[in-house]
Image (cartoon, rainbow, N blue to C red):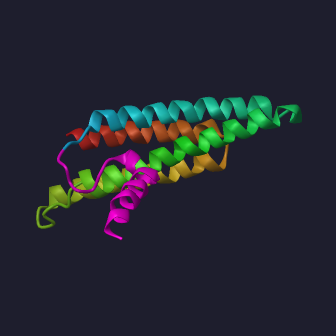
Amino acid sequence: MRSLIVPLLFATVWSSTGVLAHCEIPCGIYGDDVRFASIFEDIETIQKSMSKIDELSSNLNNINQLTRWVNNKETHANNIQDVVTQYFMTQRVKLPDFSDKAAASAYRDKLALLHQMLVYAMKCKQTTDPANATRLDELTHQFQEAYTK
């Protein structure tokens, strides 16, 4: 029985989709710049996907490619949501000393930006309106600035 536990545990961990956003051990190895670069790349991919979806939707002969672009847009929006929640919200944005009003305010500002990023990533999944991706990009820049202060 014991010999089955290690392979099962290994398979479970490596088949999980949550490993992309880093770990929750905490290991102390963080790549904030990599996470921001990943989010911006995801946004760019969402923007291209939206454009291709609009281009391909006029002809149902393109249904296979259209489906692939929709799935691609969904995947990249999910990636952003995973990094925002599993990396920044749970690991990197630290709970402040709430008696320190400036620290508490900065904390709330960061959480508000992260929440807005989650909402606009969701809106990117729901539509092909490029304004949603543009707003997501703006919010990510705003969060990056607030986070790196």
Q: Residue at x 32, y 50 (%)?
A: 87
Q: Quadrant of the C terminus?
A: top left
Q: Which residue is drawn at 61% across and 40% down?
A: 73
Q: Residue at x 20, y 56 (%)?
A: 94
Q: Quadrant of the N terminus?
A: bottom left
84 above or below 45? below
Task: Left or right? Give the position of 33 relative to 14.
Answer: left
Task: Left or right? Give the position of 31 relative to 118.
Answer: left
Q: Where is residue 133 in the image (x, y as percent from the top left)?
A: 55, 38
Q: Where is residue 58 in the image (x, y as percent from the top left)?
A: 85, 33
Magenta stretch: residue 147 in it? no
Q: Where is residue 62 in the image (x, y as percent from the top left)?
A: 82, 32
Residue 116 can be seen, yes or no = no
Task: Left or right? Give the position of 8 relative to 27.
Answer: right
- Where residue 142 sits, quadrant-wise, is top left
88 above or below 98? above
Identify the magenta region. 1-28
